[in-house]
Image: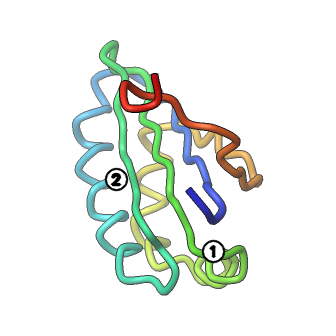
């Protein structure tokens, strides 16, 4: 898996906020989906209702930086932050290895 990975980690202020947060999260990911260089996004929710996590896979650091400089989801972000604290770390990651049944 080539290309940088970014993580968005959100802790709900209350677990009952998670359903509305997921609606906004989905809208935000749709806004990002047309960005040059975005390969895929994967959104996750915790079963206890406290967290939502996304990881985005990008073709290049430059394309990620271009999106991050002018975030298409900015109009939704304020409402998202009313529901959850952003534990986002301004770091990008690379995959070191992957395991799965096909690798065993």
- Percent x, y of residue 19: 22, 36
* Residue assigned mark 1: 64
Position of 94 relative to 102 (above/below): below
Which colour assignment does the render follow? rainbow
Give the structural element (helix, strand or loop) at label 2.
helix
Q: Quick one: 92 or 32, which is closer to the camera? A: 92
**Are the residues flagged by discs 1 and 2 in contact, CB closer than 8 Å?**
no
- Percent x, y of residue 74: 49, 72
- Label for residue 25? 2
Left or right: 61 as drawn, with respect to 77? right
Residue found 57% across the figure and 74% down from its top: 59
Q: Residues within 10 Å of mark 1 (few under 14, many from 20)?
A: many
Left or right: 38 as drawn, with respect to 46? right
Residue found 45% across the figure and 22% down from its top: 104
Q: Quadrant of the N terminus?
A: bottom right
* Residue 50 found in image quarter: top left
Cα gap from disc 1 to disc 2, whole angstroms: 18 Å
Work out which residue is located at the far right of the displayed protein and give it. 91
Residue found 28% across the figure and 44% down from its top: 22
Q: Quick one: 32 or 102, which is closer to the camera? A: 102
């Amino acid at each position: 898996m080539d290309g940088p990975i970014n993580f968005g980690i959100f802790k709900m202020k209350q677990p009952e906020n998670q359903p509305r947060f997921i609606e906004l999260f989905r809208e935000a990911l749709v806004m990002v989906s047309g960005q040059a260089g975005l390969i895929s996004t994967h959104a996750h929710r915790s079963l206890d209702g406290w967290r939502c996590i996304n990881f985005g896979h990008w073709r290049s650091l430059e394309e990620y930086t271009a999106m991050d400089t002018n975030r298409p989801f900015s109009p939704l972000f304020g409402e998202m932050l009313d529901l959850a604290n952003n534990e986002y770390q301004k770091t990008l990651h690379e995959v070191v290895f992957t395991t799965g049944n096909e690798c065993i």
